[in-house]
Amino acid sequence: MANVVFMFSPSSTSRQVVCLLLLFSLAHTQNVVVFQPSYLTATGPAVSALLLGNTTDISLSLRTVSPSNTTGSIGPPSCVGEETRWLLTRQQVGKTAVRVQLKLDKSLRLCGENETDTDCCPKPLCVLETLQVSACVGGTPKASLLIQAEIHALLVPANAGSDNKTTIPNQVYQPLGPCPCDLTFRACDVRCCCDKDCSIEDLKLFESHCLPGPFGGQVSPAPDYQCSVQSSENSPDWFPFLCVNSSPENNPYLGLFYQGGTIKPKPGPTFQQPVLSAPVPVNVYIQGSPILTLNDQYFTIPQKVLGRCVNSAPVAFLKDFKVKCVTLLRTCPTGSPLHTLPMDLRIKVKNGQGGDVIVDVSDEVATDLSQFISSTNAVASSDNWLVCENVTLALDYKIYWRGNGITRLTLTRTVGTITLNGAGDLTTRYSAVFLNGEVTDKSNSGNPGYQVGRPVIAGIDTLNNNTSSIQRMTINLWKPVSDGLCSTNEKKPILFGENATTGCLLPISRQNLTQCNLLRETVASLQAALTTATYVSRNGNPDPLTVTDWVNISYVTLNSSTAVEDTTSSCHGISSHQHIHVWSFITSMVEGVPQRDIRALQVSYSLSTWTMDCGGGDVSPCVDPMETQLFPITSSVTFTDIPINSGPPKTRFQINFTEYDCDRNDVCWPELAFPITKYYTGEPYSQSLAKGLILVFFFITASILGTPWRQIRQAWNSAAL
């Protein structure tokens, strides 16, 4: 198998794809040919590249080249071929693409000593040469490909390995310790220097990397309990009585490699897809367990796995999904999942309670196919029309459940007739929704508090059997897809703790700007559709019947700061931006995970003025009343954490008493000694300390020589008399 090294960085894969498309487009439009890549390195006996462009009259030639000794460059391509050890083949893979492949016509076996056969490698580096492939038209080279071949000889054992069972004699009667790493019968084991099947040439490849220790046939260092290891200098007093005299070859680890019986060789690694074992039947379903059919097979629906659509993916119990798959159609589909029959979809599924349910299939015919099909061949001829009937466009499953079982399973199959001119991209939809009665089983966003990255739960008040309950829903942002227009955009729920800003584009003409009231109502209705809820859940696991688990959503009324009149070419007061502000705080910790609750949620709008922009030389929107320009409508969400005041509450005395409060009083007695502390940075600490000590000395001197000390001396003298 050849290893081809392309000379580029893996981190620039997207740029390489763009460059390849540009080269392909350039070769197609300018009627030239190019090799892609134009230089590569081969480390195996086969290598291939693509020749793009007009390859109708192209002929290929191969020769061996070498750089110049003076300049180091390789000469120009030539259409005169040479006889080499490589076989050059070509294969047409398209109208404008040819796969060029080179194969080495030589054995990569390493030659033995005194061997006269020329079809082998005399040295481990078997091939080291530079090849040049030239694409010529009428004897004139149009493109060239350089290949640097650096191929090493293959390590082939002298005797082919056997797939039969290997009989290991009983080690009780025959010693097996000399070479434990000799695991392959009649074959050289790499890094096993004691293997008798390895030739001298084989040993030279890894003689400096032999396996150490007992596994490689080398006795490991003697253990500490051996009498021969301890010396008189570091031996403890009890050592002569407890040490063991044993031969170094008597190593206990050598017996771990053989069992003395018949060993069946295990197959080596393979790149083939493993065969999936049959699913283990289960009595009841739990969340996440696969749903099984009546014959104990997985119940499958097309889903996305690792970003790719898989036609047969198991459905997990209580796991909703909704995916879109894009397929390039060149011919009408004939197999599943694009071509299905109702009888094939009516499958019996185990209900998890000892019985089964059958899929109830109903069909819908799609009339508007614009959201399913898009043509990719803009220059196709009228003779390439394809008319495909009864193509499966969507499969929407509804799975009703109760407890740990399935009660009913319905499928809505959307079909349609597709007409293609050449080829086209077909976008199909697949979904599965689990319903408990008639209510969708939506997962919580935490228990009890919100977890970061989970959807924010909202709701509206409903009246069910004279009981007020909250019906769950989501608060959304714009999710730009396709062309980014608001008419085709989707919505995505806001995720707790993740700030985001999204938007879409609304085409506006000069005629629309003459109807500002209608325009303001249209934009306001688009923004209001993002947030239709009136409540937001405090925590991630709310009770729909408990009103205290929900908080009212506050909406800021739109008020323009200045009264500006509309003109014929501009409209004021457009609510083009919707901002959602969420305040949350940490209420507790559960197993080290902070539990966050939502304190409040506010929805506000920003007003802007929309005016036609006729700059940059494009004046058509200002002249043609039907010409449109794109104006942005945006939405954003911001999460703010409310800090927790963990200190004890202040008493009334602490609140009212300000004499020693340095923040509310100009005289701060606790900071009297501040100049002699390390926090004072007005001068060096040594100087401030010296000045402070001098002040203390003067204070003590004044106290001794002052009035108090004089009175004390007078009283002492009076008592002495």
Image (cartoon, rainbow, N blue to C red):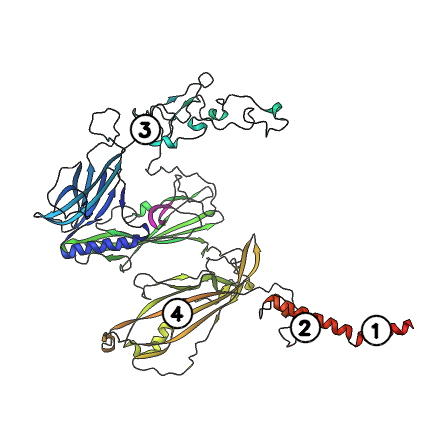
Residue 655: image location, x then y, percent: 66, 72
> Disc 1 versus disc 4: distance between alpha carbons?
88 Å
Residue mark closest to the camera, 3 vs 4: 3
Q: Of label 2 and label 4, which has the lower sequence position?
A: 4
> Disc 3 versus disc 2: distance between alpha carbons?
89 Å
Mark 3 and mark 4 in contact? Answer it, CB < 8 Å: no
Q: Residues within 10 Å of mark 3 (few under 14, many from 20)?
A: many
Residue 582: image location, x then y, percent: 49, 66
Residue 149: image location, x then y, percent: 23, 40
218 or 306: nearer the viewer: 218
Disc 3 residue type? Asp
Q: Of label 1 and label 2, which has the lower sequence position?
A: 2
Residue 207 relative to residue 695: left or right: left
Point out the image quarter for the N terminus: top left
| Vertical side of 384 occupied by 87: above or below | above
> Residue 584 lies in magenta, yes or no?
no
Q: Of label 3 and label 2, which has the lower sequence position?
A: 3
The residue wearing badge 3 is 202
Can you tell which mark lies on residue 669? 2
Q: In the image, which residues are magenta?
A: 287-316
The residue wearing badge 4 is 527
> Disc 1 versus disc 2: distance between alpha carbons?
30 Å
Q: Quadrant of residue 720?
A: bottom right
Disc 1 residue type? Ile
Residue mark closest to the camera, 1 vs 2: 1
Residue mark closest to the camera, 2 vs 4: 2
The residue wearing badge 1 is 712
Residue 547 relative to residue 667: left or right: left
Circle 4 — which element? helix
Mark 1 and mark 2 in contact? Answer it, CB < 8 Å: no
